[in-house]
Amino acid sequence: MNRKIAMLLYPNFSLQEVTCLTSALTIWFGETIDYIASENKEYLSEEGLRILPTKTTAEVNITDYECVILPGTINPLAPLFDDRLIAFLKSGIDSKVLFAAISSSPILLSKAGVLKGKKFTSGYFMQMADTFDFVEKDNFIHKGIIEDGSIITGIGMFFREFAETVLRKLGYDTGNCFMREKPEDFSEEELTFYWSDDDYKDFLEELKEYQK
């Protein structure tokens, strides 16, 4: 579909919470994701992987994107007090951007004003909501996934359901059991894989480059 999709990077962001979504977008549906941060520098994920952004907030407009993904982070204060990042999110208020925020990251949308008047959920500790008056606690719904208009929020443990909700909102066919099949439900034949003749020929050609 050639959608414009972005994912934000900030210190200690969680890959585990968003890779069901990002892998489905890229591998299943052939999309390209821009990885955006406020600075062009290396970011360390929660899992210890070192990641470089493909673009900075100064280089793009948030309204250029159909969907912006916000992963959770064990250190939400770093992005929360990143003025450039919050300003970037704020510039998407009242736009058609689909915001998809999981785990602790909805608090960034709260600070940016994106969640004003919107129902949402989050996986951060409730003392965070008590500490910051920009969090509209009356709109906090204690469920796994909440969709309100163009905003989808989720708790980190429901990363698969979060991915499915976002994909369906974008119009992708996720089937009836998105990433839920059990290994024992498959036959030996179904678990034996073959390339097509053309793909196998391509593989053999590529192999020649490694055998020189």
Image (cartoon, rainbow, N blue to C red):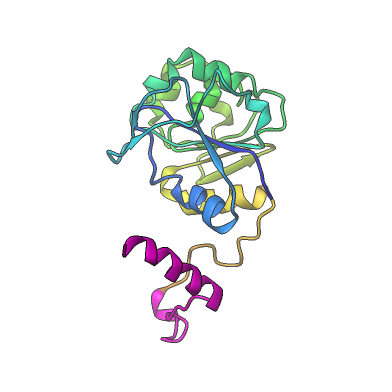
Furthest residue toward left: 48
Let me know if residue 192 is in the magenta part.
Answer: yes
Residue 181 locus on image (x, y percent) = 47, 70
Apparent side of residue 76 relative to residue 146 in the rendered image (left or right): left
Residue 121 locus on image (x, y percent) = 52, 37
Residue 163 locus on image (x, y percent) = 53, 50
Let me know if residue 63 is in the magenta part.
Answer: no
In this rendering, the answer to whether 130 lies above or below 118 is above
Residue 87 locus on image (x, y percent) = 56, 16
In this rendering, the answer to whether 3 lies above or below 99 is below
In this rendering, the answer to whether 177 lies above or below 135 is below
Q: Quadrant of residue 110?
A: top right
Residue, x 31% and y 65% (percent of image)? 211
Q: Quadrant of residue 9?
A: top left
Q: Quadrant of residue 99?
A: top right
Residue, x 52% and y 56% (percent of image)? 27
Residue, x 44% and y 16% (percent of image)? 82
Residue, x 64% and y 19% (percent of image)? 91
Q: Quadrant of the C terminus?
A: bottom left
Number of marks in the rendered image: 0
**Closest to the observer, 184 or 126:** 184
Furthest residue toward top: 83
Q: Which residues are magenta?
A: 183-212
